[in-house]
């Protein structure tokens, strides 16, 4: 199977724009990639309980059913590599894994083999990311806090919620969080939401208002203000900077 990832990404995005009814909502995909990059092995295992071949919402990139699944597998492998690199995995490791699994995908002769390979790939990346995160040596409460944040980026997250989740008082949790991460809870949440927005801008065709709403910003103008303060450019400019590499040609 000869696949140009950027070209296939373009095909997928085009198909998504043409008929969104044939594609899964972005948020479940978002949860999957963030569970992997966050090293959440339990959640990744749960999300992979449904066979890849039976996943709802896969777009039609090819008439042949097995080949169509192989195209989607290759896209998933490329996305996993990119997400994990952004969370600290070495480029060479991430892309070598991606190449290895895409080559293995090419040798699959039926849907069951492909689904099993998808599970193995997802868990492989997740376990490696979990190992990377262990090296940060966060306390149990801060690990709980960070995991909660990554799992709820699509919601407004308050210190009160995190306090209840970890069993620590708000003041003590705030002090401990800053001590271990070097950032306040609010700063940490905002930066991870903007990180998620960067991925959505690069790899989806969602509008700025949709991205803002998905990540629970109060309004698009506030989202734009925060994004520019952290990245030095507006969300639109950021998308334009990456559109040619992802194959997405959008002007909004």
Image (cartoon, grey):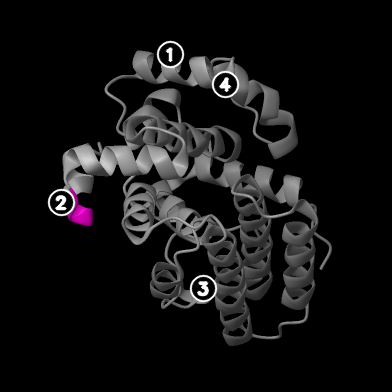
Question: Label 3 near label 4: C-beta < 8 Å?
Answer: no
Secondary structure state at the residue bearing disc 1: helix
**Residue holding disc 1:** 225
Going from the N terminus, do you reach mark 3 or mark 2 first?
A: 3
Which label sits on residue 231?
Answer: 4
Where residue 182 appears, x then y in whole percent? 46, 36
Going from the N terminus, do you reach mark 4 or mark 2 first?
A: 2
Tell me the chief SS of the magenta region: helix
**Residue drawn at the location 72% of the way across and 75% of the way down:** 105
Q: Nearer the viewer, residue 59 or 169?
A: 169
Going from the N terminus, do you reach mark 2 or mark 1 first?
A: 2
**Residue holding disc 3:** 52
Query: Which of labels 3 and 2 is toward the front?
Result: 2
Measure the alpha-carbon separation of dots 4 and 2.
Answer: 32 Å
> Which span of residues is magenta-colored?
164-168
Where residue 16 appears, x then y in whole percent? 52, 45
Question: Label 1 near label 2: C-beta < 8 Å?
Answer: no
**Residue drawn at the location 44% of the way across and 75% of the way down:** 45
């Amino acid at each position: 199977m000869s696949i140009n990832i950027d070209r296939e990404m373009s095909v997928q995005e085009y198909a998504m724009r043409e008929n969104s009814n044939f594609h899964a909502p972005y948020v479940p995909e978002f949860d999957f990639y963030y569970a992997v990059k966050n090293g959440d092995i339990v959640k990744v295992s749960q999300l992979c309980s449904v066979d890849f071949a039976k996943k709802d919402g896969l777009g039609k990139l090819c008439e042949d059913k097995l080949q169509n699944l192989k195209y989607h597998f290759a896209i998933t492998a490329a996305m996993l590599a990119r997400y994990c690199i952004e969370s600290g995995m070495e480029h060479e490791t991430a892309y070598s894994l991606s190449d290895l699994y895409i080559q293995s995908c090419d040798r699959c002769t039926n849907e069951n083999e492909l689904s099993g390979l998808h599970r193995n790939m997802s868990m492989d990346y997740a376990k490696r990311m979990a190992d990377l995160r262990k090296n940060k040596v966060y306390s149990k409460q801060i690990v709980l806090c960070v995991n909660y944040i990554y799992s709820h980026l699509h919601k407004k997250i308050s210190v009160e919620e995190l306090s209840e989740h970890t069993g620590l008082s708000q003041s003590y949790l705030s002090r401990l969080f800053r001590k271990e991460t070097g950032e306040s809870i609010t700063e940490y949440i905002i930066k991870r939401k903007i990180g998620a927005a960067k991925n959505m801008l690069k790899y989806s065709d969602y509008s700025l208002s949709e991205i803002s709403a998905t990540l629970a910003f109060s309004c698009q103008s506030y989202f734009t203000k925060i994004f520019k303060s952290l990245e030095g450019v507006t969300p639109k400019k950021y998308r334009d900077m990456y559109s040619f590499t992802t194959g997405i040609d959008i002007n909004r």
